[in-house]
Image (tube, rainbow, N blue to C red):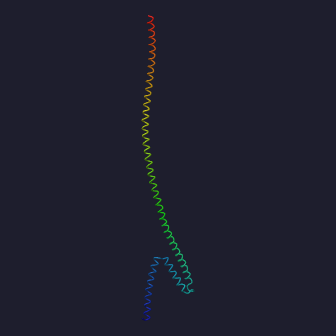
């Protein structure tokens, strides 16, 4: 192989590598912009450090700023990851809390069922009591009616007794009168 051919082969292979690198760079840029910027800045700062310090002092300063920015971006990424981890933990804690709430909910449902049963029992008892009260009121009305009837009868009997007393008094008077008349007649017969 001649040197020209070797150089040409190397040039073509380096072109292919450059093309692949550019494709990778584009992919990384579009999918991981913050990380890619950080890598790119590191590469740039390395290339700047290889250059002479006299020519590119302002560029290096800018690159250092970029490094600082990329460091901040990395910190932001770490913070985002931490917050994601916290979210995951909170979700798992949320699951635990959900489990606790579900258990409490089940207990509350059981208590609610028991309270409903007690409430139904109390309602049934109150209905029974109401029914008994209604029956007792009916009986009371009947008894009051009977009492009125009995009082009426009592009044009637009193009136009859009064009448009988009067009759008895009259009869007594009559008897007295008849006795007196009989005595008089007897005495008159004796005299005769």
Q: Quadrant of residue 6?
A: bottom left
- Residue, far front: 190
Please say if 64 is above or below 11: above
- Residue, far top: 192
Q: Quadrant of residue 126?
A: top left
- Of residues 14 and 156, the one nearer the viewer is 156
Where residue 81 appears, as percent x and y from the top left, is 50, 72
Q: Quadrant of residue 112?
A: bottom left
Please say if 57 is above or below 176: below
Where residue 84 appears, as percent x and y from the top left, is 49, 70
- Of residues 5 and 149, the one nearer the viewer is 149
- Of residues 116 and 62, the one nearer the viewer is 116
Where residue 14 appears, as percent x and y from the top left, is 45, 87
So how many labels did they put on this image? 0
The N terminus sits in image quarter: bottom left
- Residue, far bottom: 2
The C terminus sits in image quarter: top left
Please say if 174 is above or below 133: above
Where residue 159 appears, as percent x and y from the top left, is 44, 24
């Amino acid at each position: 192989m001649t040197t020209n051919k070797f150089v040409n082969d190397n040039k073509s292979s380096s072109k292919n590598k450059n093309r692949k690198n550019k494709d990778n760079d584009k992919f990384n840029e579009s999918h991981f912009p913050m990380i890619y910027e950080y890598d790119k800045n590191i590469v740039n700062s390395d290339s700047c450090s290889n250059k002479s310090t006299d020519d590119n002092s302002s560029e290096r300063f800018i690159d250092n700023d970029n490094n600082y920015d990329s460091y901040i971006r990395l910190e932001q990424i770490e913070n985002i990851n931490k917050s994601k981890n916290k979210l995951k933990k909170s979700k798992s804690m949320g699951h635990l809390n959900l489990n606790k709430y579900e258990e409490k909910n089940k207990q509350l449902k059981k208590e609610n069922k028991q309270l409903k049963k007690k409430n139904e029992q109390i309602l049934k008892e109150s209905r029974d009591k109401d029914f008994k009260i209604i029956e007792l009121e009916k009986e009371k009305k009947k008894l009051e009616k009977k009492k009125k009837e009995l009082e009426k009868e009592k009044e009637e009997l009193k009136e009859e007794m009064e009448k009988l007393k009067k009759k008895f008094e009259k009869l007594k008077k009559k008897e007295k009168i008849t006795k007196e008349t009989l005595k008089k007649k007897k005495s008159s017969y004796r005299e005769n």
